[in-house]
Image (spheres, helix red, strand yellow):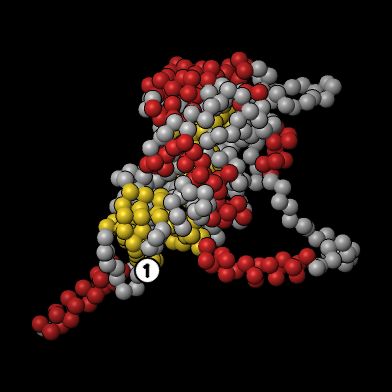
């Protein structure tokens, strides 16, 4: 009996050890930029089941663990883009001034090559936003770029839902021309845009009261469900984040005053090129700002930005992030963060936070990602050199401990891809198809975003 008991205990211990070593990754001897606890030299990171299990020197892992030698390399948290339109088959639903009922989730394409390119630039997470054709646009999606997986795996399950607002030239459709006899869509002015927002909140407040009265049995007939107003009620209840496109400081201030009026907080002012002018007002309300590093003057309302915008906001206590609003610029957000050290002298770790921990805070996901800490998701990037160097590149990008970009593998596959492309280019695409066959479809690199911009104006 004792022998059987001993065998059973040994088996249990063996299973426990196996469970501990299952899905382990050990990254050794790196310079770790934690984005919260400073820089750690010659440090190891142990990842277990997608989470950061240990950080320290000379860590040990189980026999089945994957070992990555990062000697001479740098590790940062995965970059988070707080304003992106990547992997979206459509951006604007421009037919109405309020399209709060639409969902970005319904138009996501997990095969978009821009996802892979983003991973190659160290981007692991993004806030996918509706375009800016509407005063109140559609509902956002906060995703991790798990390229090669079904779309369900991209979603961050506990990310607070959000919605896109917009002010300025785009929602009043300044760039759109109308045919004779065509009725322009309201609003056509900046004051009209603010009225559309206020009207939506008045209607949502009344709708919420009608449901509250019904639930309290003050009325007997349930209100008719309104999927346009439901997301706006969630804003009033503090359950949905507002991400507001805009440039001019007067418009962003007016939106925050509107939020004061209806008792909610704006989560982020997007773009915010003039946000430095009202930095104390933004800080007092706990609103974040997500900006371009140094992109402006591409249209009239974008003329008044300065490269010290982020520094002034940070100095006033505002949580600042740097976004891309571009599939291409997204791949260089590490360098955009570095510019903040040049313009105003933002400390290195604070500059790194602007593309890691700060956008995570703005999106409400900082408990799981954005910094290198024990217990957080293992969303990390291994860089060939310091990520703020123009000579560095991402060698490896991991999401929850799984490798989604490996530069060495990418280089190894390039000859094979080149041969495949050469074979495709030799095909006679102009040859008439056989009877009943469909015409060959030639992939286009022209983005859906560009088509939408032509119709509704620049999404920026």
Rendered position, 383 above or below 300: below
User: Is residue 356 visible in the rendered structure shown here?
Assistant: yes
Which quadrant does the C terminus fall into?
top right
Rendered position, 39 above or below 252: below
User: Residue 224's spot in the image, x, y percent?
Assistant: 54, 28
User: Is residue 208 visible in the rendered structure shown here?
Assistant: no
Q: For residue 172, what is the image quadrant?
A: top right
Depth order, front residue of 122/65: 122
Q: Which residue is mark 1?
A: 67
Rendered position, 130 above or below 286: below
User: Residue 144's spot in the image, x, y percent?
Assistant: 48, 50
Depth order, front residue of 135/413: 413
User: Residue 310's spot in the image, x, y percent?
Assistant: 46, 31
Mark 1 surroundings: few (<14), some (14-19) or many (≥20) residues within 10 A: some
| Residue sitting at x 33%, y 49% | 39
**Residue at the left extreme, as displayed:** 2
Q: For residue 425, what is the image quadrant?
A: bottom right
| Residue sitting at x 38%, y 66% | 69
């Amino acid at each position: 009996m004792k022998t059987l008991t001993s065998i059973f205990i040994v088996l249990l211990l063996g299973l426990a050890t196996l469970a501990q070593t299952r899905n382990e990754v050990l990254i050794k001897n790196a310079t770790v930029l934690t984005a919260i606890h400073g820089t750690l030299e010659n440090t190891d990171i142990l990842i277990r089941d997608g989470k950061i299990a240990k950080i320290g020197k000379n860590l040990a892992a189980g026999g089945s663990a994957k070992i990555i030698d990062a000697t001479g390399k740098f590790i940062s948290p995965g970059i988070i883009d707080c304003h992106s339109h990547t992997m979206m088959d459509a951006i604007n639903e421009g037919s109405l001034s309020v399209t709060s009922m639409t969902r970005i989730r319904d138009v996501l394409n997990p095969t978009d090559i821009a996802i892979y390119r983003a991973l190659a630039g160290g981007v692991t997470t993004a806030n996918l936003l509706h375009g800016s054709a509407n005063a109140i646009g559609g509902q956002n999606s906060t995703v991790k770029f798990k390229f090669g997986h079904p779309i369900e795996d991209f979603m961050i399950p506990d990310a607070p839902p959000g919605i896109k607002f917009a002010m300025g030239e785009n929602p009043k459709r300044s760039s759109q021309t109308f045919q004779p006899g065509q009725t322009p869509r309201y609003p056509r002015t900046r004051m009209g845009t603010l009225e559309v927002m206020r009207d939506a909140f008045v209607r949502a407040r009344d709708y919420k009261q009608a449901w509250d009265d019904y639930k309290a049995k003050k009325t007997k007939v349930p209100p008719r469900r309104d999927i346009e107003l439901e997301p706006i009620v969630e804003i009033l209840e503090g359950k949905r984040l507002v991400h507001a496109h805009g440039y001019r400081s007067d418009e962003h201030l007016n939106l925050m005053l509107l939020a004061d009026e209806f008792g909610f907080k704006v989560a982020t002012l997007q773009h915010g090129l003039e946000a430095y002018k009202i930095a104390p007002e933004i800080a007092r309300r706990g609103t974040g700002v997500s900006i371009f590093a140094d992109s402006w003057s591409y249209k009239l309302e974008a003329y008044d930005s300065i490269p010290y915008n982020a520094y002034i906001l940070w100095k006033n206590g505002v949580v600042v992030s740097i976004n891309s609003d571009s599939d291409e610029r997204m791949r260089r957000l590490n360098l955009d963060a570095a510019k903040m050290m040049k313009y105003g002298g933002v400390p290195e770790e604070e500059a790194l936070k602007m593309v890691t921990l700060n956008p995570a805070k703005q999106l409400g996901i900082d408990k799981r990602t954005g910094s290198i800490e024990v217990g957080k998701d293992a969303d990390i990037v291994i860089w060939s050199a310091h990520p703020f160097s123009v000579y560095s590149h991402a060698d490896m990008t991991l999401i929850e401990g799984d490798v989604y970009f490996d530069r060495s593998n990418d280089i190894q596959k390039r000859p094979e891809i080149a041969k495949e492309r050469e074979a495709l280019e030799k095909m006679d695409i102009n040859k008439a198809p056989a009877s009943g066959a469909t015409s060959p479809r030639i992939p286009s690199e022209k983005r859906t975003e560009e088509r939408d911009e032509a119709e509704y104006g620049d999404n920026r």
